[in-house]
Image (tube, helix red, strand yellow):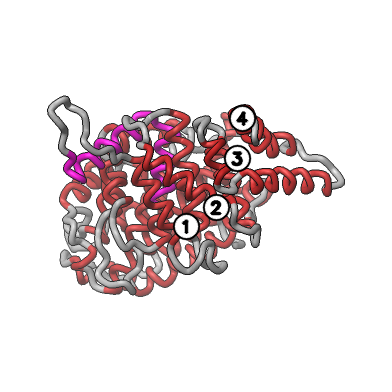
Amino acid sequence: MTELIAQSLLQALNSNSSQESSHLTLERNELPSSSIGQNLKKWNDDLESELLRGDFSTKKFEDEKSSFVSSAIKKSADTLHSLILNAVDPTIVSDAGGGTTECESDEEAERSSWAVATSTAGDLLVGMKCDNLSLLAELLRAAGLFMRWFGQVIQPSFESSDANDNHFSNNPTTRLKCRGMLLLYCKILEMETPTIESPDIPRFSSICLFRATYGNDDLTVSARKTVVESIDGCVFLVNALTKRDQPIPRLFSVLRNVHHLVSTVPASAALMDKAIDSLNEKTSSNDGEFESKYGLVEVLVDNLTWTVQSLPPFPGDKSDRRSEMASEILRSLFAVDVRRASKYLPSNDTMTKIGVILCDLLKLPNVDDRVHQCKLAVVALLLNAPEEYSGYLLANGGIIPLIDIMKYQASAIIARKRSRPDDAASIVPIMLVLGKLAQANETV
């Protein structure tokens, strides 16, 4: 893009304001969307392509450090926030003539966001016309991409600059990460879309939730805490995670949220266990112990089993995202294990299921890098495996594939003419795993 991203977003968001804003009515299904939706889709496609390419340089953003452009970034985020609320419920954020209007302050924006989120019904998407579904999808997609762009590209450049040159008095994504918007993302996350052909709005909402809570700045840390402690975000994620017949990209996005929260907020895994208890209406015996143990670990293992064993044979073609999902589940299991955050210790049956899947993954041929990445996630999980897993892996053909991984990593390091700082770190996990297994079982 030759134009500044924030300014081009504003142009897309305002593309039909002069012609169509007077036609914004209080009826949800009458919200005009054609022009703004088309222009916003192009902006989304362009920015997503650049983010995937990593096509950003420090020089490219030198001009972003001006008060004018900083104002444009804030203005574009605020406009995006207002349009999302208006797309969900035009009766909350509208002017006297029925047109959309922005909140004058962040405090007012939070009140409006909370009003929309708390009044939003579960059948919201079912009641929308096709064009309005497409518009809401592109608005949420833009919000996720905007937060990603700001967090990965703009924010680091400002944080590394002189404090006197920082033109942001507050984070311009404040309204997109406020408590009301976090609740709205969560509520949309578990909604049903009208048809299979409808845009996957719950997935875009899941991405917004991830981007709103991913980072270490004060605003994002606060948002993450809010999701876990204030709005029952873990309950919404569990509901989404356990829903049947979901598109793989959506389930993958939900799993990223689960992994991220378990890794960064220790209390989240126990809250997810509790939500699963409620969901499955667990009963307790007279001594207060659960008759059956089914918590976050079991849900993750069931998802992993389906991911690896479903058809077509794993990992599928290049468009198949099950390998990414498998890696995300394995990392989530590792995060739960490292923090010992789940209130349940896995049952013997669950541990056996994990062992079966790990051996299946290890024995897959290295046909592409996706399989290798899954195997590296298996290696990380085995770092904390119980000692008896050594005999299990030996009996089920899991040791030789681990040795092959070490050979592969070592040969890749040797083949490079110049060493890299991460060479040693990359081979340490597999060496630790093999050493641990050998120590636990002399036959290994």
> Do the residues bearing badges 2 and 1 touch, measured as CB atoms within 8 Å?
yes
Residue position marked by numbered label 2 in the rendering: 361
Residue nearer the viewer, 324 or 234 = 324
**Mark 3 = which residue?**
157
Q: SS at mark 2?
A: helix
Distance, label 2 to label 3, CA atoms, is: 40 Å
Q: What span is colored magenta in the figure?
A: 254-282
Check if residue 414 falls in the magenta segment. no
Q: Which of marks 2 and 1 is nearer the N terminus?
A: 1
Front disc: 4 or 3: 4
Closer to us: 162 or 130: 130
Percent across and percent down for residue 69 are: 52, 48
Q: In this view, does 137 lie to the left or right of 394?
A: left
Please identify, in this view, whether the residue under mark 2 or under mark 3 is nearer the observer: 2
Instruction: Classify 10 Å Cα crowding around label 1: few (below 14), some (14-19), many (20 and above).
Output: many
Identify residue for label 4.
Answer: 436
Q: In the image, what residue type sits under mark 1? A: Val
